[in-house]
Amino acid sequence: MSAIHICSSLFILFLYISIASALAKPLGMPSLVDKRAKAEFVCTACKGSYYSQGLETYRVPMALYELNRARLVQAMVSKLGETGTGIILLQGGKQTTRYDTDHEPIFRQESYFHWAFGVSEADVYGAISLPSGNATLFVPQHGIDYEIFCGKSPSSKSIKEKYGVEKVLPLEELSNYVTSHLDQSESQLHLLSGKNTDSGNMAMPAHYEGIKSHVGKMNLETLFSCIADCRVYKTDAEVEVMRYTHWVSSMAHVEVMRSCKAGMMEYQLESLFQHHTYTHGGCRHMSYTCICACGPNPAVLHYGHAGAPNNRLLQNGDLALLDMGAEYHCYASDITCSFPVNGRFTKDQKCVYEAVLNAQIAVIKSIQPGVPWKDMHRAAERAILKGLIGAGLLVGNVDEMIAADVGAIFMPHGLGHLIGVDTHDVGGYTSGTPTRSMRPGLRSLRTARILKEGMVLTVEPGCYFIDMLLDIAMMNPEQSKFFVQHRLKDFRGIGGIRLEDGVLVTKNGCENLTICPRTITEVIDVMSGGVWPPEEDVMPELRRNWARRESGKMVRYILPS
C-alpha cells in the first residue's frame, strides 16, 4: 500500500469517526459505531499501546481487541435487541502447576479471553458492559512474597494504559461490580457456555465465589454463538498478526529444509524450527506439537506425540513431512512442508508430490466467497487420484473412485480447518452452519461452512500410504478393483506427503499467507543453498502473498512471475 493510499484511508476513517461521534452525542446513542471506527483507525495508523517482544518483532495494536469487543457487542445487541442490557463476563486462564508439584508450566491465555482483551497475565477476569461496550479488567492483588519472587505488580493505571480498557479494578471488587450492574430488571449476566466441535470439550462459564446468587439473571445461550461466530471472521488487524506468524514460520521451515540431512534425528529438525521462530520472531509458544515425521512416519497423521516423540534417525532416501507452526500473542500459524531428506526426489516420490501440489493449486485457485468447503475437499481428492493414476498405482474412472471413497484411503483427514487464536479455531459446526458429513474423508472435515470473506483456513491436501487402510481396501472389491496390485508394494512404507498453507478468503478469491518453497524446483534449489524468498514467483497460481518485516510491521511486495 502506498503512502498516499494510507493517508487517504486514515483521512476517511477520521471523517467517519467525527461524523459517528457527532451523531451519537445529541441522540444519546450507544457509541459502538464510534468505538469500532476509532479502533479501526488506531490499528491502521499503528497508534496507541501495543504488544511486542522487542527488537523488530511485530507490534500488535491493543486496539485490535477493542475492535473485537465492539464487534462482539454489536453481535450481542443485534441478537438481544436494542434494549439488551447487562454485562458479558469472561474468565481468563489460570496459572496451573504440574500435577502435585509447584512447577509452573509457561502460561498461555485462554483463547476466548485473549480474543476479547489481549491480556497476557493469568488469573484475570474481564467484563464488557451492554450496550455501551465499556470494558473492565479485574486483576489479582499480589502480596510481598509474590513480589519477591516474581517482581512488582503493575499499577491499575499502567494496566489500563497497556490494554486500552475503560477501567481496571482489584479482583476483590468483582462480586460487587457484577451485582451493581444487574440492578435493572432486564439486565442479564452473559456467560460463556458451549461445545468445541473439534475437541468435544465445553467452554466453561466464568465462576467466582458468590456468582450463584445471580442464577436468575444468567444467560448461557447468547454469548457462545456470538463470540464463536465473530472469531470465524478476521479483521484486517488480526490478518496482519497472522501474516507475521506465517512469515516467521515459513522462514523457519526454509532454515530447517536447508539444514536437513541424513544422520540427523527428527527432534533436531523440531529444535531448529523452535530456535528460529523464538530467536528471530519472538514466538515463545508453538501453535501445536511439532510433527517431524520421516521415512514411514508420515503415515502416522499426528506423529510427534509422547508415544512417538520425533525420535527417528533420518535415512538416505527418506521423505520428511514437517508440520510445524509458531504462534505470536496467541495467533497461530499451521504449515506443512514435505521434501526428500537427501534433496533428491525419486520418480515415485516426485509423482506423489506433484499430485499433492496439484491438489493444493486446484483448491487455492477455486477458493472464493460462496464456495462450499466440502467441494474443495472433493477437488483435492480428485487431483490426488488423477496423480496416482498417472503414477501407475490406480486405474479407472475418478468419479467412480470418489463414489467408492477411494480418495479417503489416501487422504483420510479433512482438507483443512479454520485457524486464528487456536490452530483448530472455533466455529466449525456451530448452530445454523452446514452439518458434518458421515462419508469417509468428509466426516473428518473440521468445518463444512460456505466460504465467506474474512475467513482464514488451512489448505492441507495430503497423500499417505497407511498399511491398515490399504489392507482394508484390498479386502473390499468395490475399492480394490481400482488398484494396480504389483505397483502397490512400491509405495508401501514411503509414508506420505502433505503440503499446508494458511489462506485468507478475500472478496474475489484468496491470499496465501504462507510463503514456503512449493514447486519441486524451489525445494531442490533451497536445499542446495539457494536464496529464499526467491527473485521470481514461478508459481503465481499459489497466490503467495509475499511480505517482509520492517520496524515491527509487515510490508507486502510483489515478485515478478
Image: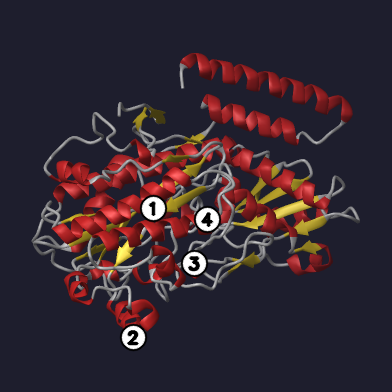
Which residue is label 3 attached to? 442
Lateral position of residue 559 relative to residue 419, left or right = left
Label 1 and label 2: CA atoms lie apart by 36 Å
Q: Residues within 10 Å of mark 2 (few under 14, many from 20)?
A: few
Q: Which residue is mark 4?
A: 373
Task: Assign a secondary structure to mark 2.
Answer: loop
Disc nearer the start of the sequence (3/1): 1
How would you rate the neighbour count of disc 1 (Cα within 10 Å): few for under 14, some for 14-19, many for 20 or more? Answer: many
Q: Nearer the viewer, mark 1 or mark 2?
A: 2
In the image, farthest residue toward the bottom: 475
Could you give the CA–CA distance between mark 2 and mark 3, rounded to whole angstroms? 22 Å
Crowd tier of the residue under label 4, counting other residues whose Cα lies within 10 Å: few below 14, some 14–19, many 20 or above: many
Whichever of callouts 4 and 3 sits on the residue coming sooner in the sequence is 4
Task: Assess whether mark 1 and mark 3 are in contact (beta carbons under 8 angstroms).
Answer: no
Of marks 2 and 3, the one in the foreground: 2
Instruction: Answer left or right for 99 relative to 528.
Output: right
**Residue at horizontal 75%, vertical 46%?**
129
Q: Secondary structure at mark 1?
A: loop
Circle on res. 475: 2
| Three-letter code, disc 4 | Trp
What's the distance in space between the residues labelled 1 and 4, CA to CA?
A: 18 Å
Which residue is farthest front?
396
Q: CA distance from mark 4 to mark 2?
A: 31 Å
First of labels 2, 3 by sequence position: 3
Q: Residue furthest right?
A: 185
Amino acid type of disc 1?
Asp
Measured Cα–Cα span from mark 4 to mark 3: 10 Å
Q: Nearer the viewer, residue 250 or 139?
A: 250
Occupied quadrant, residue 103: bottom left
Q: Position of residue 57 (x, y in %)?
A: 37, 36
**Residue 412 in the image: x percent, y percent?**
40, 69
Which type of secondary structure does the marked residue at label 4 adopt?
helix
